[in-house]
Each structure stands twice: as structure tokens, then as C-alpha cells.
Image (spheres, helix red, strand yellow):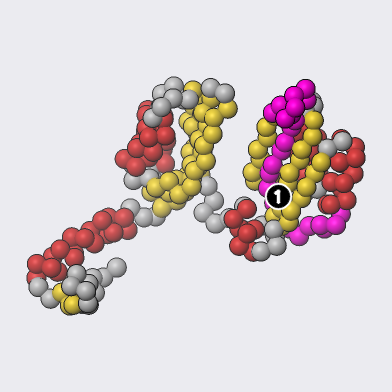
Amino acid sequence: RALPERCFSTAFGHLAPITTTRNKMLATRALRPLASLTARRPLSQLVVSVVGPDRGGLVSSVTRAIAQHDGNVVESSSFSIGPVFSMAMLVEAGADQHAALTNAVQSAVPGHSVSAHEAEECVEAPAFAAALDVSCADGVGLIARVTEFVANEGLSLSKLETKTEGAPHGGTQLFSLSGVMLSKDRVNEAKLARGFKDLELEMGVNIDMCVYDDAEAVKMAA
């Protein structure tokens, strides 16, 4: 972007024109990082995943390696299950830097599994999005049965979290599943609700579905 003819400063509590040669030089230097970023275009997005033993400083090591290759972490999610740590990041970087960036992350955490996949730059907003919550006594095959039903209805799960914990008064293990269902097509909500009701009776579980009506909420859910 061209340097404007005049710059303004608010250092003295009001807008004052910067007209000195020195200040123009300072303004030009301040814009150099922006020019450098422009020179590195085109940018593209990469999904980087790291899985391995949990330890202190792991996130720092990974993100430092990404930054050293001019990568910008746009979005990330991480969690630990038992002794295993898992992290997924959406990284924006130069299109010619993907391989070098992935290798740098692997070198930073040699004891972990690192994988990378190019991401689509523009993902179409879903036509349908709904939160799904399932709770019941723990049992074999619960996740498989619920997710099978979701898939058969033409829906995908963009987020899924499950856990098992002891009942407040002991004795029974309680299972819970939370997720977000998406579809690029319109969904017959009444039919879907009836299907979940039948599944409740079949499995002896409690199922709640909450449809996102607001367009912005749908985008956030995705």
C-alpha cells in the first residue's frame, strides 16, 4: 500500500501533521514489516496436528517453530487424555513454506507424531447446525450407535466430546456425549427429532437437540 501524502499524530492530544523528513523516514520504516508480509504472499492455510506424550513446554516448542517460519496460528485446539497430549492448529503461512514448517515442528518435538494437511481457504457456511447432548448409564457401543444414526441422517459431527464419570452417589458409571451436527443442505427438523426420540426409547438414553437459528451462531458452531 502506498505511503499517504500526509501522516497525522495524536501525541499532543490533537491531530497534528507530520511534515519533517525524519518523521517521514520513521513512518516508512514502520511500514516495512507490512511490506515484508505482502511480499510473502500468496498465503494459504495448513492444519497441523501434534500427538504424543504430555510434557511441560510442548505448546511453546510447537508454536515457536511455527513462528520461526513466519506461520500464524489462526485457530487451535488441544487436550490431554491420560498421558497423551493432542493439539490441532489452523496455520496461515506462505504457500511455499508448508513442508519446511511441518519439518520444523517435527524437529521441535521429535518424540511426537506430526501431520499436516492443506485446508480449504473458503468453507461454505452450513445450512443446518445443531447441538447434540446425550446422557445415560455407561455401556458398550453407545458412541457407535449414536454417531451411526447421525451419519445415516446425512449429518456430520464437527465437534464431539465424550466422558464417563461416577454417579454422585456411587455405583453407576454415567456416560455423556456432546457435539455439534452440521449439514450443507436443509434438514427436516421434525423428522430428525422423531428419529432421536425413537433412538432414546431403543437405547434407554436421554437425547437433547438444540438447533442454531441465527446465521452467525451457525457459522460459530461450524
Question: At 48% across and 38% down in the image, what residue appears?
Answer: 48
The residue drawn where x is 52% and y is 37% is 78
> Mark 1 is on which residue type?
Ala
Judge from the rendering whether residue 206 lies leftward or rightward of residue 78; answer left or right: right
Vertically, is 87 above or below 27?
above
Q: Is residue 194 above or below residue 149?
A: below
Determine which residue is flagged by label 1: 131
Give x and y (percent) for residue 144: 77, 33
Residue 163 vertical placement versus 132 (above, below): above
Q: Quadrant of residue 190?
A: bottom right
Instruction: Compare residues 154 and 117 and report the one nearer the observer.
Output: 154
Give the residues in magenta.
Answer: 165-191
In the rendered image, the residue lying farthest to the front is: 169
Residue 87 can be seen in this image? yes
Q: Residue at x 80, y 44 (%)?
A: 207
Closer to the camera in the image, 99 or 135: 135
Residue 169 located within the stretch drawn in magenta? yes
The answer to if 174 sits in the magenta stretch is yes
User: Where the N terminus falls, by quadrant?
Assistant: bottom left
> What percent of the width, then of the height, locates residue 109?
40, 27
Mark 1 lies on a secondary structure that is strand
State the residue at coordinates (73%, 44%): 133
Relative placement, left or right, of 137 versus 63 is right
